[in-house]
Amino acid sequence: MHLKAVKTLLIIFSSYMLLAGLTQAQDLGAPLELERRQAKADMTVTSARLLDDGVVITAEGMMGVYGRVYATYELKAADNSKTHGSVHGNGRGFLADGTFATGTFSGYFSREGSVFTMNNVVLLGDGTQNFDVVIFDAAAKTLTVDAYILK
């Protein structure tokens, strides 16, 4: 199976699982609550490479349980939209003891002004899964990550 097909299937499956969880929470009358994996992480944006239909953002920073993390976010606009689309990427975390963590993610983004909000399902190399809410402010050159436990 081609990588693009796998990514598409991951997005569809992830979206289905999130919607199923939201539907169940609404049916029970309770809001969906996710537990934080770690405290909010502030990242340093190291580059933003413009594409015809999106942007590739690279960032680095200390992310609690993952140590020093280097991440790449590739945003692609949906149908010539400049306000929403898909996001794919990966990250690598390096801990002081020499161990490292890997992760790949897919999701969707929306933009209001200079602020991009990304909602990603993350599959980590150890089999754990996160739901990350990433806020990138292009004007302020800031990026924050809120990581929540899915598995």
Image (cartoon, rainbow, N blue to C red):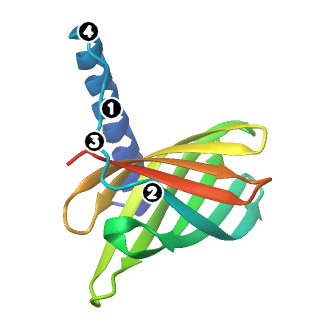
Q: What number is the disc on residue 4? A: 2
Q: Secondary structure at mark 2?
A: helix
What is the three-letter code of the residue carrying label 2?
Answer: Lys
Q: What's the CA distance linking mark 2 and mark 1? A: 21 Å
What x and y, as percent, mark residue 51? 74, 60
The residue closer to the viewer here, 82 or 110, is 110
What is the three-letter code of the residue carrying label 3?
Answer: Glu
Q: Nearer the viewer, mark 2 or mark 1?
A: 1
Q: What number is the disc on residue 18? A: 1
Q: Secondary structure at mark 3?
A: loop
What is the three-letter code of the residue carrying label 4?
Answer: Gly
Q: What's the CA distance linking mark 2 and mark 3? A: 30 Å
Q: What number is the disc on residue 41? A: none
Residue under label 4: 29
Above or below residue 111? Residue 61 is: below
What is the three-letter code of the residue carrying label 1?
Answer: Leu
Q: Secondary structure at mark 4?
A: loop
